[in-house]
Image (cartoon, rainbow, N blue to C red):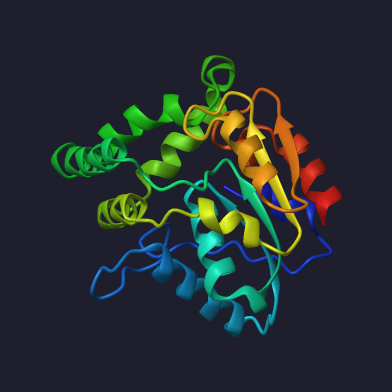
Amino acid sequence: MWRHQLEALPGWQCLAPDLRGAGKNVLAPANEFSMAVYADDLIRQLDDAGAEQAIVCGLSMGGYIVFELLRRFPQRVRGAILSNTKAAADTAEAKRGRDAMAARAQAAGVRALAAELVPKVVARATFQRRPDVANEVREMILRQPLAGIVGALRALRDRPDSTPFLRDISVPVLVIAGDDDQIAPAAGMREMARAIPGAQFVLIPESGHLSPLEQPQAFNTALRAFL
């Protein structure tokens, strides 16, 4: 998902890790998933890379993990990029939706989940006019282990509310939103940026929930300027 950004930052040491249960990352023996566990995994990877500090960039669920890193490991975070994400916890209705999606995935498989998700996570313009991007997103979903998807949905359901924490963030922050994001709408992201002291806000045109993949040039321009 981040290949366009890795190619655009040749002078930086970049880590684009698979989260547990995703990509090629093997599942933990206990299949434990939470934002805290994801954050612990990433700290271990920073330790392995010899990186005392990092500028962390998280998209969607990655943003929730960034909040966890900022809360629990502030000394390790030099700056943060919050892309296509939100600070609030799931509502009761959203929690039920996570459980229902996990049940559908277990009953019908990952392919059914991909058919449901792709039109929601890319902009309508992307879905209608850029089948190559939509197909790539579909293939990315199909490669994910079912257990990892279910674990991530439960972690999303149970994540803490980061809204009260926003005013306490003291590192430089860039907030990036897509103008057609159906999952983390731009208006809410703009309000989130206003609540973080000194945060910058960038709106990416013709982008849905996957701004770095849908509009890499605009995303990379904002990324390089922030760095």
Q: How many marks?
A: 0
The image position of residue 18, as x and y in percent, is 48, 62
The image position of residue 80, as x and y in percent, is 68, 59
Question: Looking at the figure, which quarter contains the C terminus?
Answer: bottom right
Rendered residue at 35%/34% (across/down)? 114
Left or right of 146, for residue 11: right
Residue furthest to the left in view is 107
Q: Is residue 204 above or below residue 44?
A: above
Dividing the picture into quarters, in which one does residue 37 lie?
bottom left
Residue nearest the viewer, comparing 166 with 152: 166
Left or right of 131, for residue 15: right
Dividing the picture into quarters, in which one does residue 119 lie?
top left
Q: Is residue 45 above or below residue 172?
A: below
Residue nearest the viewer, comparing 183 with 159: 159
Rendered residue at 25%/39% (across/down)? 101
Left or right of 42, for residue 226: right
Residue nearest the viewer, comparing 126 with 162: 162
Rendered residue at 69%/82% (across/down)? 52
Residue nearest the viewer, comparing 211 with 192: 192
The image position of residue 24, as x and y in percent, is 42, 62
The image position of residue 43, as x and y in percent, is 54, 77
